[in-house]
Amino acid sequence: MFTLFRWLLRIVIGILAFALLAGLLLYWFLSRSLVDYAEDFTLKGLDGPVEIVRNNDSVPHIFGQSDHDVYFALGFAHAQDRLWQMTMLRRTAQGRLSELFGERTLPVDELMRRLDLYPLALQSVKAQDAQTLNALQAYSDGVNAWIGEVNAGARGRGAPEFWFFSNEISAWAPADSIAILKLMALQMTSHASTEVLRGQLSLLLPPERLLDVLPEDKNPGIAALPKYSDLVPGILPAMPVKTAALPFDPVPQIGMAGASNAWAAEARRSAAGGALLASDPHLGFSAPTIWYLARLQLTSGSIIGGTIPGVPAVLVGRSDLIGWGLTTAYLDDQDVVIEKLNPANPEEYALPDGSWAKFEGRQTIVRVKDAPPISLTLRWSRNGPVLPGTHFNLAAITPPGHVAALSWTALSGADTSMTAAMRVMGAQSVAEAIEGGKLHIAPAQNLMLAGPDGIALQVIGAMPIRDAAHPSQGRLPAPGWMEAVGFKGVYPYETNPRFVNPEMGILGNTNNKTIDRAFPEHLSFTWGDTQRIRRWLTLMETRAVHTRESFIEAQLDTVDPTARLLLPLIGADLWYTGTPAPEGTPESLRQRALSLLAEWNGEMNEHLPEPLIATAWIRAVQDRLIRDELGPMADKFTHPEPVFIERVYRNTDGAAAWCDVIQSAAVETCTDVARDALDEALLRLTETYGPNIESWRWGDAHQATHDHAVLGEVPFLKWFVNIRQSTSGGDDTLMRGKTAGSGANPYLNVHGAGYRGVYDFADPDSSVFISATGQSGHPLSRHYDDLGELWRRGEYIPMSLDDELARAAAVGVMQLTPAP
């Protein structure tokens, strides 16, 4: 017995020793790609010496003798910290993900090939001005210099992920940076998906009920929305197709397109006497975040702010003179066009004059890991690329004998958005920055500006011209064989909305409607916010003058205007009613929940149960309102639509009809819906969080999901690469934390401000900023998530252009010397 025990002990010790050795060996391999920020390099391509000072938060401050060398060093720093992220962004734009991930990413690759984003980026290189071309080339040389160092030395393949996938890294080129901007444009628009959804719903609902669930801009010039089957006969209601989430999928779900907040105050509305600007662009969360903080010392002056790895521009930030922020403009820059095929030759489509035109076409090969390559035939009509029914759920609205094409302003081979970004970044005044935005094509953005000559909000991006006789005004897919359908060019830049130095001295945008203009010079029928703007106006109007601190307070505000609006409506007949119910009954649980909500001020604090109860209740109310009419199509509405619920409970235009369940003989009231929805919500929450509702925490459900796009799903590894944080806020708070809306936990925080900045031009070096994770993309680096805890707590780091402050307590000073 003793001998058996001794041998078992030896085996256990041997296994543990082997596991420890394997772990140490794995750590050694993975850590080889950690960057030594104090290492010096001698590199070809530099004109003179460059110094990269990474401050205590690992924000690089880049000092060179020429702009060329500064952009070179930015590319070098981006590649050092985010090489895997950069190559994945490029592969996504190129449609080359399946070379690494196999058949799983084929749908993404197919869409990107059909949209032709990368070939269009290649064409757009020659459209840039000379200064931008020089910056793109210098940046590319810097990226390639680091790739060369990785290939020449033992640097762990450049990133830990390359140990699990191919470490083939193609040289960086200027077109790669332009392609990433085009990819961002795709991530920030969902008009095509909204058109398809509106088309599907128009087959199920009468026009007045359709306007309930998808409310539109009510300008006087808007015509009644036609039924989709009147535009394109032969289409029948179809069941929605459920698809699994795809890694690196750039097409946002409806409601998940780019969002953001930005506001500015003139010097006369500032307590310190200088202009103020706050900016927090919202995108999907990831580990690492898409944002990378940097400071560039250019010949025109210093610039500091948020960059995107792969792009040689500070997209949001400040100089000594001006600050700039971005919010998604929701400009309607996409149209789905239905093309009629020639029955005698499916390679031809109908033209308005009754003749047939041949599709432009070519072949492309998609290489797939562990599978044969796929050959695709790419086709374009005069209205844009032809997309199969698997994309955007187009099959549901495409009748037999037809195909769908996509018109989109970003599909330009002369896209000068990169030049526009460089000109805005280098502007010396607000007026000069407005002029710089003239060349921006896509994604359409609200450019918020503050500087010595005041404040401004300028919509940048190409505004497509539509015929005044367009049958759906761009709200529904439309027949391409009609003369009035299709883009007729773009409006002059001067047509884009512009607001400069308003009388009240303050400008702001939360993706709300910016301007009232009738079709066809309207901006959009669909906007990204109807709620946050209410809270912002309240906070701005409560002070005669503002400070950096008041702008920070607004940026971090977690009071939910939707809860304040809807709870009194849906609970109007439920508060303080009935005698106390026996403990343990659904009635008792409901009374406890209502008692908590009655005393709640709407603050979506992570430590409170009320935000969880309110959010679950409002979700359940909407689902009960629409489920019987829409059936499976109700799954498309993953988030509560506040305007819809308000219309129902105020009975606007007869919208209370939604409360009656049409499949039942009884006539249900809106109070019945609210009561049953609350009971259902509480039952589900009790199953997950236990019966003691006073101990529930919103933050337990509303965790920010900074997940690694690939390794984040791998058992064991996910605990190291994913960053999860308990967070406050919600779908409609200024400190926005958009919930997932579906899945096992629909309350996960998946979309919000990956960057926050507040700039005070009375004392520019007192400006602050923060990003959501850290500067490094290496999970073993202490800078992988060091900024994340500050971000979660609503804290910031200094946004200073003081050279000495950058050098004080720097984590490393890197010298780049030109090779002989």
Image: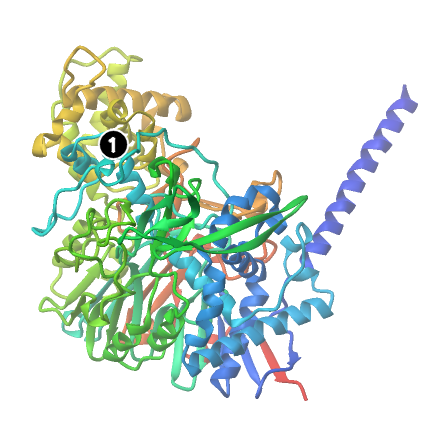
Residue 630, placed above or below residue 198? above
Secondary structure type for disc 1? loop
Report the side of 195 relative to 167 (left or right): left
Type of amino acid at the residue the image marks with label 1: Leu
Q: Residue furthest right?
A: 3
Report the side of 527 relative to 54 (left or right): left
Tell me the quarter of the image containing the N terminus: top right
Q: Position of residue 655 (x, y in %)?
A: 13, 30
Report the side of 449 relative to 17 (left or right): left
Dot 1 alpha-carbon crowd within 10 angstroms: few under 14, some 14 to 19, many 20 or more: some
Report the front residue among 379 and 423. Answer: 379
Tell me the quarter of the image containing the C terminus: bottom right
User: In the rendered image, is residue 727 in sight?
Assistant: no
Q: Which residue is mark 1?
A: 203
Quarter of the image holding residue 228? top left
Residue plotted at (55% across, 45% down): 106
User: In the rendered image, is residue 625 in sight?
Assistant: yes
Report the front residue among 257 and 149. Answer: 257
Q: Position of residue 798 (x, y in %)?
A: 39, 68
Report the front residue among 99 and 142. Answer: 99
Q: Position of residue 51 (x, y in %)?
A: 55, 80
Report the side of 742 relative to 667 (left or right): right
Q: Position of residue 220 (x, y in %)?
A: 7, 51
Quarter of the image holding residue 460? bottom left
- Its colouring scheme is rainbow
